[in-house]
Amino acid sequence: MDCEPIAVLSDIHGNVRALDAVLAEIARRGIRRVVNLGDCLYGPFDPRPAAERLMALAAPTVSTH
């Protein structure tokens, strides 16, 4: 059985600084599979940079709001 690690993202709320830190850690660990559970952009932060990072990641996403 293949036991490749999976990173799970959730509740980003447009916080691109936190997202960048998490994505850097995912890359540092060599994790290639990512899934996003949602709550991506709604919140008090600027959602555009977070949306751009997430779209480039092209991870399966459960919910986009």
Image (cartoon, rainbow, N blue to C red):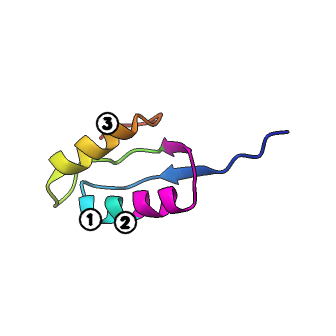
- SS for callout 1: helix
Residue at label 3? 55
Q: Are marks 1 and 2 in contact (CB under 8 Å)?
A: yes
Q: Residue at x 58, y 51 (%)?
A: 31
Q: Quadrant of residue 30?
A: bottom right
The three-letter code of the residue at mark 2 reads Ala
Query: Residue 4 in the image: x percent, y percent?
Result: 70, 46
Q: Is residue 52 magenta?
A: no
Q: Which one is earlier in the sequence, the residue at label 2 or at label 3?
A: 2
The three-letter code of the residue at mark 1 reads Arg
Give the Cα distance between marks 2 and 3: 17 Å
Q: Which mark is residue 17?
A: 1
Give the Cα distance between marks 1 and 2: 6 Å
Q: Residue at x 40, y 44 (%)?
A: 38
The three-letter code of the residue at mark 3 reads Met
- Which residues are drawn in magenta? 22-35
- SS for callout 2: helix
Label 3 neighbour load within 10 Å: few <14, some 14-19, many 20+: few
Label 1 neighbour load within 10 Å: few <14, some 14-19, many 20+: few
Query: Residue 47 in the image: x percent, y percent?
Result: 18, 50
Vertical comparison of 4 with 43: above or below: above
Q: Residue at x 29, y 41 (%)?
A: 65
Give the Cα distance between marks 1 and 3: 16 Å
Q: Which mark is residue 21?
A: 2
Label 2 neighbour load within 10 Å: few <14, some 14-19, many 20+: few
Q: Which one is earlier in the sequence, the residue at label 1 or at label 3?
A: 1
Q: Residue at x 21, y 56 (%)?
A: 43
